[in-house]
Amino acid sequence: MEKRLLLGDEAIALGAIHAGLSGVYAYPGTPSTEITEFIQTNKEAIEKGIRSRWCTNEKTAMEAALGMSYCGKRALVCMKHVGMNVCADAFVNSAITGVNGGLVVLAADDPSMHSSQNEQDSRFYGKFAMIPIFEPSNQQEAYDMMSKAFDLSERLKEPVLLRVVTRLAHSRAAVAIGSASAQNQLAPATDNAHWVLLPGNARRNYLDLIDKQDDMLKASYESTTNDMVTINNSDNGKWIGIVACGIGYNYVREALNGIKNNENNYMILKVTQYPLPTEAIQKMAAACKSILVVEDGQPVVEEDVKKLVNVSYKVEGRLTGKLPRTGELNPDNVSLALSKENKPVFDPAQNMAGRPPQLCQGCGHRDVYAAIGEVVKEYENARVFGDIGCYTLGALPPFKALASCVDMGASITMAKGAADAGLWPAIAVIGDSTFTHSGMTGLLDAVNDKSNVTIIISDNLTTGMTGGQDSAGLNKYEAICLGLGVEPEHVRVVVPLPKNMPEITQILREEINYKGVSVIIPRRECIQVAARHARERAKQNNK
Amino acid sequence: MKKDIILCGVGGQGILSIATIIGEAATEAGIYLKQAEVHGMSQRGGDVQSNLRLSTDPIWSDQIPTGETDVIISMEPMEALRYIAYLSPEGTIVTNNKPFINIPNYPDESALKSELEQLPNVQLDIEAIATELKSPKSANMVLLGMAAPYIEVLSVDQLRKAVSVIFARKGEAVVEANLKAFDRGVEASKK
């Protein structure tokens, strides 16, 4: 069998292609971006005509995928965990409509917040929507699970959630590749009552969804990757139960291998598919003195296990401090929870300094912040509301420009709310891709309210932070702003370069002093993407 | 046999291409490999690292436990020290000794140098060597060559072959330049 070295994300992508995928819908977000990128560039996917262009945001992605599923074809939606918040309306209601072709929603969680603003656990969303959740423990399972997930989705006629974490998404291992299935034929749904969520229909559908819960639980019991493993070290040793979810299982096995002369016995339940197989846990509780729950993210399973056992029974995990309450699991904290401390051998380094990420030298965002920094000094109460992207780094030295950064699009709406409260100048800084993702509706609110805000759309012609993906509104920003009702004389375009500093600062002052909505668009291509484009052009010319 | 390796440096220095070559050699040799990478925001001029685990037996965790790293391969001297807690008692640091200074509070260079010298280490100015070889882009291959004798679970020849495989699509001249850099690193290695 062919083996390929794949990132977890790539294994998911190839698994989906081989499961007969017809379309992937996604907005870039670390650590999920590489799934869609793989499908966009994979020869097999291109030959099969799998739809893979980036979407404007996670909600448009989720809804388009549901439309493809409606037509009987298999669709995949990919996003980072916070993207689940953006698509939550469509996601939760897709469990009420149910699906036609298989629909897999992939959420890549980021415990430890390597590139995120929180560490919310997407398994809560799966439970909330009452649908099955898959959580692979390694790259091979990630590949294999895609066809299982699509099959289960079509059998139950419900969407399924597949949850991974950063360490699986961005870790590489050899994966054995299976054979590819054909795509489904076009077969649009005919049962309108299921798809039109008027209250009368929705009530019936909701009862259907509740009826399916037993089937979902049965599927978890039958899953070949929800294993119970026993490690019998000593006939007289005490039995310890461990519920290990997804990659947590790997850390448990790593840690147990490292404990010398261990006399304890272990019953380990590897959980890779939910609903939680409750009977197995009750069996474990009967056989073991205590249960340790090892899960990456929030204590979702730990709370559920507590409900399955007596109040006095010992369940340990993140809630009891046996494992850290926050941050990702690692071989060290799991080992410590199993009573072995991994200690450093060498003394900590003396000559050491932090090296935080920073905006590239020559980046246009730098010139934007230099201009803002100069101008806001002139106003006592100026506040700059930030957004999500490379330019969030403007919060760090040397710029220290930002008063806030919350979620996609919040710069414009928070500036608007602050202006409503009487703050002046209220300035928003948002990137081009973030603006089309979630900024346009906020701008319309500001226009309708004639809010006194100055909005800077720092346009680098790409989605920069995730590696330079296409930006949905490319070359359309002035038209969008005018279309939403910003007055033409207050839509100003500048080129962020040091030599243009006098012009940029002058325009900033003018628009701050204008009592109404102004939009300034500093536009210069991301230097990373510009370099890539130059290489591509050189390659074309050599051909 | 197993070898746990931390590859590190500053975003943009090209540690992932070293990982790609070791990955190719491991796949060709049929041994187990897990390689955890860092993508996203921290790539922008911040510290970056990749945990690379090689073994003749199956590997569980994608990350290396504290105190178990056999080789730290670093494109930058201070970055090599950042992962010192992970180094095993028998482990070795293989590093470029030329600082990359993009922060205002970079430590005193001579103090850093003497701290590094008290640890099991091999260090070299890989950029100077690459420039001397007239292929400044292959500095990371000098570093890989220096580390090659310490990887053990893969032979120097297996790694050398992987260098030619990975660079093959860039043409004969690029392959030659990188092999020369790799060989020079092997020569400079203490082992």
Image (spheres, coloured by chain):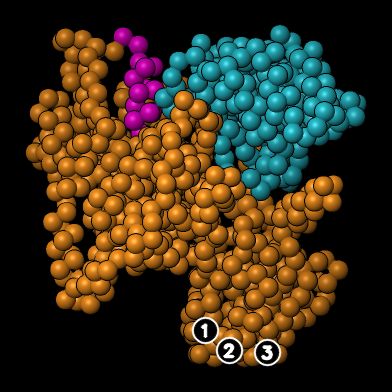
Report which residue position mark 3 lands on.
A488
Where disc 2 sits, the SS reads: loop
Rendering quarter of residue B46 = top right
- Label 3 amino acid? Pro
Tag 2–tag 1 contact (CB < 8 Å): yes
Rendering quarter of residue A244 = top left
- Label 1 amino acid? Leu
Q: Is residue A239 left or right of residue A168?
A: left
Q: Which mark is residue A444?
A: 1
Q: Chain of mark 3?
A: A
Residue A457 magenta: no
Residue A228 appears at what percent x and percent y? Answer: 22, 27
Residue appearing at x 36%, y 40% in the figure? A145
Tell me where the magenta segment starts and ends, as one range: A248-261
Residue A260 magenta: yes
Report which residue position mark 2 lands on.
A485
Residue A274 sits above or below residue A468 on the image: above
Q: Kindly indicate whether the residues beneath marks 2 and 1 are on one polypeptide chain.
A: yes
How many numbered marks, from 0 up? 3
